[in-house]
Amino acid sequence: MNKVMSNKLVLTLYVLPALCLLLGIVYVPIVYTGIYGLMEWNGISDMKFIGLDNYQKLMSDSSFWNSAKHSMYFAILSTASLLPYLLVAVLLSGNIRGVNIFRKIYLIPMLLSSVAIAQLWLKVYHPTSGILNTFLESLGVAKTPAWLADPNLVLGALFIPILWQYAGFYILIYYAALKNIPQSIVEAARIDGANAWQIAFRIKIPLISEVIKVTVVLAVVGSLKYFDLIYIMTDGGPNQASEVMASYMYHKAFRTFDFGYGSAVGFFLLLICLAATWLIRKLTASKEKIQYS
Amino acid sequence: MNRKSMAVLMLLASLAWILAACGGSANTGTGGNATPQNGGGEQSGEQVELHLMHLWPEGSSLAQYNLVNQIVDEFEQANGNVKITIEVLDNEQYKNKLKVLSASNSLPDIGFTWAAGFMEPYVNGNEFANLNELLEGDLKDQFVGGTTEAYSFDGNTYALPVELNIVPFYYNKAIFEQYNLEVPETYEDLKNIIQTLNDNNVTPFTLGAKDAWTASFWYMYLAERLGGPELLDEAVASNTFTHPDLIEAGRELQELVDMNAFIKGFNGLSNDESKTEFLNGNVAMFLMGTWEVPNYTTNEEIPQEFRDSVGFFKFPVLEGGKGGVDDWVGGPGVGLFVSENSDHPAEAKQFASHFVKRWGELSVTEAGVIPATKVDTETIDLPQMYIDLLNELNVANKVTLYLDVQMKPVAAEAHYNLVQALLGKAVTPEEFAQQQEDVLQEGK
């Protein structure tokens, strides 16, 4: 087996199909998006090369920066929500009763498609017949909010289903990482007299710091690119109050026939995501890998 | 990679992928067009597959949905070699998909488009086939005067109108009776009705302004009743939007919001969601196009009792306003186009012609929607509401074409946001008018 795997030709053959697919459906489109971003093009007629005009326009486009602000808001909230997920995972990784049930409860929303989740939460938020407002009314709240129609509330209202949707995903990642910690280390600490609190914060969490970094990147980049649920629930409205970068790109390209500009937004979004990833890596870079063994 | 990143990546990829496909040759990969390429087959008896895309899902537009199927079946039976595949999307999805498909030159052989500003990019991009020959031949003198013009550019017609709609108020007679309300003669009457209904905890109007074109009806009517039948057409034609009556209309609309005339949370509700509230009898009135009429006349899915209790009235006149009660918002709705890039243009045009003729006959008797072709109502038994509305259309003084359809895509998109902002009090009427003018003057 080792002989086969060290054969360069075989290696190339194994890697090639995946590489072609990746090139074809990820990298080539990215390059094209970059090129289209330099064009004035309505998607139908001939393209006209206009250099960086689209990007210049982007810099002074208040609607775009508004949507960027909303994306940032989601990114910050998503990152902040990682902490409770981590705590839940730590709890679950201890030998508490009914762990399996809890794991399943947290994971189920992840199995639903975004469309189904959006439909579900549309019903929850319905201004008159939704269970949320019905519940508030039963508590005696006289003026219940119109969650998705109020520009001040819509972002928060959208974040709840997003939180709900991804909780299981992050908890599962943390849970798996925590379960990978050798039991001997935890036992050694316990013999040395560490309490549960110390074991969690001094031993377990530092040991999975690499995984935590990955989840921060996932949460930030995922939030910056978030699209589907927002598109279905509010379509960026009312009056762009919940417009995010990806939905703005979509609206520019597909609603107003400005594919050139839409592509520029898409490409800029890619750059922002790369920059965010790089920045997070930089900020969290540790000099040496934490190891206790 | 988690699913949200995946979803967005797919979107990014598909965006570029679709764009990429345009430059190349392939028609594959966009999922819509199932037209096979019959390279070098015989000329006669050749199997032809046509792709038809329409926007009447079974759930919300049952009458139209059935009608399309019936006409397609008939056509297939009469032309054994033609097979027609049908794809159905709802309104918003339909609009989006049309753009995606046109970007890759893979529009369905036959499909529907809206008039004027909406179809202009497609016409300029040579996506729609010229249908003059049909209008001069097969379909000569079939259409109601003035309907084909909305689909014409420089004297060439690129789509065949199938609908003609106006926008009345539908109202729930049972609710009106319960509170001793009469159909309003003036705008003041209407405001009194709103007041009475609010006093009794009944929502006066349902409105799904998440789909902002529904809110645009309100703005259009107020502007028209204030400034007269030519006001809006002239505003769009001259790219100005600062006429005092256009600003005043915004003020009136915000006053209605202040009066709680509309259903709670209207800016977050889709048209379908808001319609459900009316169909459930929770809301007294609904301002919507005549394509809704089958739901109140012939649609068996909706209880007879409710259908019997729905009536309609015209948007009342405003005191001192220049608009009359017989001025309507409306116009030809969707029209049938044939793709310029169709592999079987002859068959596609033949089907289009057949479709329009049969639609004209059947839409009256079977579906109760108003076609753009001439109708003889004398000889057929039709629901009263339908006949009444058809008569209204016949005596209409003027039908102002929907603002969003009149405007070019960028201005129309801005109009949607601005109407939502106006209703949500995020802009003043003056800002509304100024911003609309700014974007109109961009000319895009």
Image (cartoon, rainbow, N blue to C red):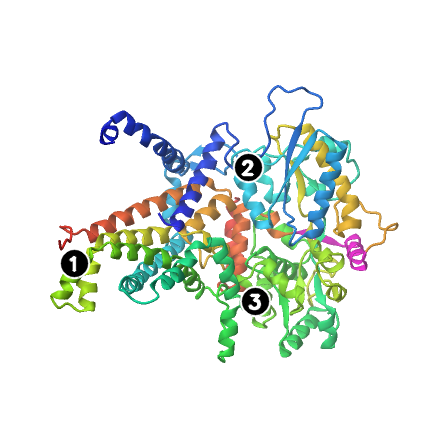
Element type where label 2 sits in the image:
helix
Given this view, does label 1 or label 2 mark the residue nearer the observer?
Answer: 1
Q: In this rendered view, identify the residue nearer to me: A130 or B320.
A: A130
Residue range in magenta is B383-401
Q: Amino acid at mark 2?
A: Ser
Q: Amino acid at mark 1?
A: Ile
Density class for disc 3 (Cα within 10 Å; few <14, some 14-19, many ≥20) is many
Residue drawn at x 31%, y 54% as measured from the top left: A173
Q: Amino acid at mark 3?
A: Gln
The residue that mark 2 highlights is B102
Residue A49 relative to residue B179: left or right:
left
Element type where label 3 sits in the image:
helix
Residue A169 in the image, given as x and y percentages of width and height:
36, 55
Q: Does the magenta run of residues contain B226?
A: no
Q: Residue furthest right?
A: B379
Question: Which labelled disc corresponds to residue B254?
Answer: 3
The residue that mark 1 highlights is A185
Using the image, name the chain to which the residue with label 1 belongs: A
Q: Are marks 1 and 2 on the same chain?
A: no
What is the C-alpha distance between the residues marked 3 and 2? 38 Å
Using the image, name the chain to which the residue with label 3 belongs: B
Eyeballing the image, is A196 above or below B138?
below
Residue B132 in the image, given as x and y percentages of width and height:
71, 32
Given this view, does label 3 or label 1 mark the residue nearer the observer?
Answer: 1
